[in-house]
Amino acid sequence: MSARIVTFGEIMLRLKSPGFERLFQSPTLEATFGGGEANVAVSCANYGMDASFVTVLPDNDVARACARELRGFGVDTRDIVYTAGRMGIYFVESGAVQRPSKVIYDRAGSAIAEARPGDVDWKKAFADAAWFHITGITPAISDGARLLAIESVKAAKELGLTVSCDLNYRKNLWKYGKTASEVMPEIVKYVDVVIANEEDVQKALGISAESAASVEEGKIDTSVYESIAKAVMKAYPNVSRVAITLRESKSASHNDWSACLYNGREFLLSRKYQITHIVDRVGGGDSFCGGLIYGLNTCSDDQSALEFAVAASCLKHSIPGDYNRVSVKEVEALMKGSGSGRVQR
């Protein structure tokens, strides 16, 4: 597979309470790593793609251990920039039944938050690359990260890469004086594939449709999403595809999961999965992005690419941690109907 995929964003130290405990219910936290764009790179590498992750990290043992772990998945880390500062941290408490999961960020002043345009050699990072992926998380971190994110998508388009962006609205991050709706339109001008969930398009781009789904109620009306996708393409003629994940949240443990995709010609809906015993939903959207990138690069049509992405992200809900540790064969087996969970011998 020749297409080289580059992702860019912040990776953090992830500290999680054991099992479904509340934070500090016991004096133990599980330490791993994770972050939206790194999660996508890991997914792509697991599918056999040539995947590279770019970020800015402090030059210390924790950050080096993080890069080592990424290399263990087959992700190229040679363009990571090491500098002074700290590594961002986030704390996770897994929800269950009616108690929602909780994420607490401790990432102010991280190395990437202090980064500025010019800190990354984009020409070198994008050498021989075909696809670039970014999210709305990076420009939410700080004004410097915003400028670096804009620099990245401009460089990617100048070099002829396909650019995908998961809008990924995070209300708890936009604290430095700019709003998502002020910043994200500047980035989306350079994007080919927009990926979003139920509220991202409205919060990040200010585009909505009447009678759209109530995220809090966990109800989805798929009929409104074609008009939302068309509105995005009308506002941004450079966009060739809009994919929207559709999560129907029955409880923290039970979600229905599907997605839709509009390519300017067809409005496609995926199969719906009932995920009744969620192990870890953090990283679910990232696993969809990784699956969609793989699908759009390898599948014969957009419907197949969409189905691969939804099946991949369905499986992620069964795996603890940020990363989706599944193979192409496992995703394809689920796509073909093998969802019984029987032991494979």
Image (cartoon, grey):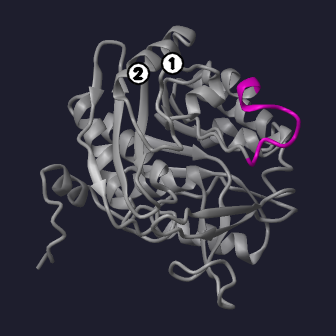
Which quarter of the picture shows residue 303?
A: top left
For the residue pair 165 and 44, the one nearer the viewer reads as 165
Q: What number is the disc on residue 209?
A: 1
Residue, x 37% and y 40% (percent of image)?
A: 292
Mark 1 in CB contact with mark 2 (< 8 angstroms)? yes
Q: Which residues are magenta?
A: 172-182
Where is residue 318 drawn, in percent x and y? 36, 67
Q: Position of residue 92 (x, y in %)?
A: 62, 69
Question: In the image, which disc is placed on residue 224?
Answer: 2
Q: Is 245 rendered above or below residue 264?
A: below
Q: Quadrant of the N terminus?
A: top left
Point 48% across, 50% down: residue:
286
69 up-or-down from 314: above or below: below
**In terms of sequence position, does the residue under pointer 1 or pointer 2 come before the other?**
1
Q: Position of residue 242 (x, y in %)?
A: 44, 25
Amino acid carrying label 1: it is Ala
Q: Residue at x 85, y 38 (%)?
A: 143
As rendered, which of 47 and 198 lies closer to the eye? 198
